[in-house]
Amino acid sequence: MPTAIVTGGAIRIGKAMALHLAGKGFHIALHHNKSNASDVVAEIKSHDVQCRGYACDLSNLEETEKLIAKVLTDFDDVELLINSAANFIQENLEATATKTLTDTLQLNLMSPYLLMRDYKRKINKGMIVNIIDERVRKHIPTFAAYSVSKVGLKHLTELAAVEWGETVRVNGIAPGLILPPQGGAPDYLEKAAKKVPTRTHGKMQNLLQALDYLMENQFVNGDTLYVDGADSLR
């Protein structure tokens, strides 16, 4: 059975995708940082697949550069890398602290860059999926460093797709209103949905359907699927 590497796999989108892939028969190399991954690892194993957790601070580039090699000591048939780990810090341009800028760019852009590079060097098959954000089409300064990092990740996705397409397809998924922010009010999604063109919010299943499409359609390369109800076009 093939193996998928999922960063940020203990929470939110990464967790949902890891469990979805396990249900499709993938072994899972589950990256996590501070989140307790033991329950997720056990849940993944209940799908009768192998799963191993890898604790790594992806804002530390030296640690990042060791991750792919560690996975390959445990799994020998890796076919998919999902870059889902990210931070989401609310600071506009003027208010952005230097540490916020450094940590955000390293976690959201530089670490995916290194993981993608090492995936190509050491594995050189299958597909990479980067979790981007529908706001890359907008100009909202509220989460300035985050937005810059995701715009960069989209461009990186396209560059890699052009350079590596013969052996590794590289695509992105840009979620819209799917999950409330951590600590958000119980009615956050319902209130925010009023501004979305569909007047609805998405569900995690919509992102999993996008992932399935990218996996199944072998001629899609360098694309970013916007799963956002056209909110990014407002």
Image (spheres, rainbow, N blue to C red):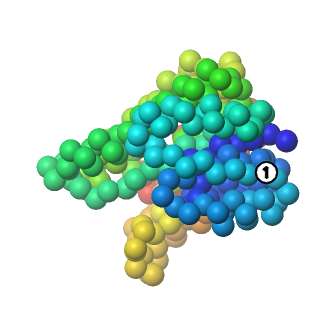
On the image, the x and y values in percent for residue 25 come to: 83, 50
Q: Which residue is mark 1?
A: 50
Horizontal arrangement in the rendering, residue 91 relative to residue 49 (left or right): left
On the image, the x and y values in percent for residue 96 come to: 20, 50
Pick the front one: 121 or 84: 121
> Can you say whether 160 is above or below 64 in the image?
above
Residue 2, quarter of the rendered image: top right
Q: Quadrant of the C terminus?
A: bottom left
Residue name at image x 21 percent, y 44 percent: 98
On the image, the x and y values in percent for residue 73 come to: 71, 34
Pick the front one: 160 or 134: 160
Could you tell me the amino acid type at mark 1?
A: Gln
Residue name at image x 73 percent, y 52 percent: 51
Residue name at image x 44 percent, y 33 percent: 62
Horizontal arrangement in the rendering, residue 196 relative to residue 23 (left or right): left
Report crowding for label 1: few under 14, some 14 to 19, many 20 or more residues within 10 A (C-alpha). some
Which residue of the protein is positioned furthest toward the left in this rendering? 94
Residue name at image x 73 percent, y 65 percent: 43
Label 1 element class: loop
Horizontal arrangement in the rendering, residue 72 relative to residue 116 (left or right): right
Q: Quadrant of the N terminus?
A: top right
> Can you say whether 20 is above or below 203 in the image?
above
Question: So how many labels did they put on this image?
Answer: 1
User: Is residue 204 in sight in this rendering?
Assistant: yes
User: Is residue 112 in sight in this rendering?
Assistant: no
On the image, the x and y values in percent for residue 196 come to: 44, 64
Pick the front one: 36 or 99: 36
Pick the front one: 69 or 77: 69
